[in-house]
Image: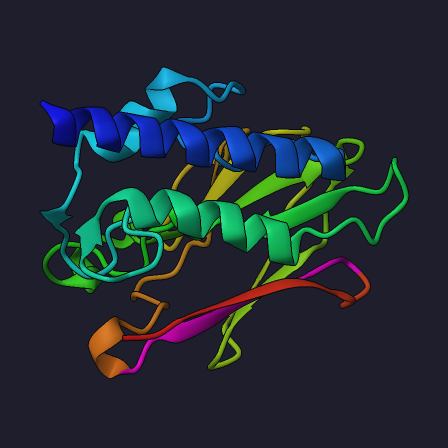
Amino acid sequence: MQARRWIVLTLSLVLFLCGHVMAAAGLPHPCDVNGDNEINLLDLVAISVHMGTMAPSGTPEDTNQDGQINLFDLVYVAIHFETQAAVTHSAGAPVVKIAPWCSQFDTPGNDHYALNEEYVCFEHVGGDPVNMTGWHVKDAQDHTYTFPPFTLALGAHVRLHTGAGTDTSTDLYWGLDRAVWQNLWYGGDSVFLYDDAWVPKDQYTYVP
């Protein structure tokens, strides 16, 4: 009983501190792990429901890729945004980041047979709605995707699936016939995000 109480108190403290960090930065809260635009008990549940459970490589909730889903994944999210989403932009300038917490680079089974289960996620963490038309995504092998006409609202995120499909406001499709993201046992891969003028906006590398 005491252990459960300690877990809840610790998670609550992490969310509280994370909320204050992001509020001071004038940015939305990345600790909103379930995407409901609030930091509350549901976010604690999203992490603690899997507290300490083993996770296969590439599991989106295992944000720090330590093979477990636990408190450290929530801490990782807070640290990632505190260090990478520092306020270096004007108040109205959009900030789009790669979101490892909702990405899946390694699908269960053979990646080539589950192309739309392989995806990378981008989220709008600050500023005005951003027109991402013509923006680019690349991997370490220079496979390149260019965004179609698309606008990402503040606080929203979009998943870019490797396979084919119909684009929506939440899901885009690369249209490839083979997996693009290198699995962890091949040494991992890197995601690079550029705007329409090829100005770097963010990058993320996942490694074993």
The percent position of residue 151, horizontal first and vertical second, equals 69, 34
At a point 58% along the width and 66% down the height, the residue shown is: 203
Colour treatment of the image: rainbow
Residue placed most toward the observer, 91 or 197: 91
Which residue is painted at 47% across and 82% down in the image?
141
Q: Which residue is found at the position 63% from the left and 32% from the top?
A: 20
Q: Decide whether residue 18 is among the magenta residues.
A: no
Q: Nearer the viewer, residue 149 or 90?
A: 90
Image coords of residue 86 (percent x, y): 72, 52
Vertical order, 99 against 37 (above or below): below
Q: Is residue 206 left or right of residue 4?
A: right
Residue 189 visible from this viewpoint: yes
- Marks counted in the figure total 0
Please identify the quadrant where the N terminus is shown. Answer: top left
Q: Is residue 98 visible?
A: no
Percent coordinates x, y for residue 19 in the rendering: 57, 30
Q: Quadrant of the C terminus?
A: bottom left
Give the answer, above or below, for where 37 lies relative to 55: above
Report the span colored magenta.
187-196
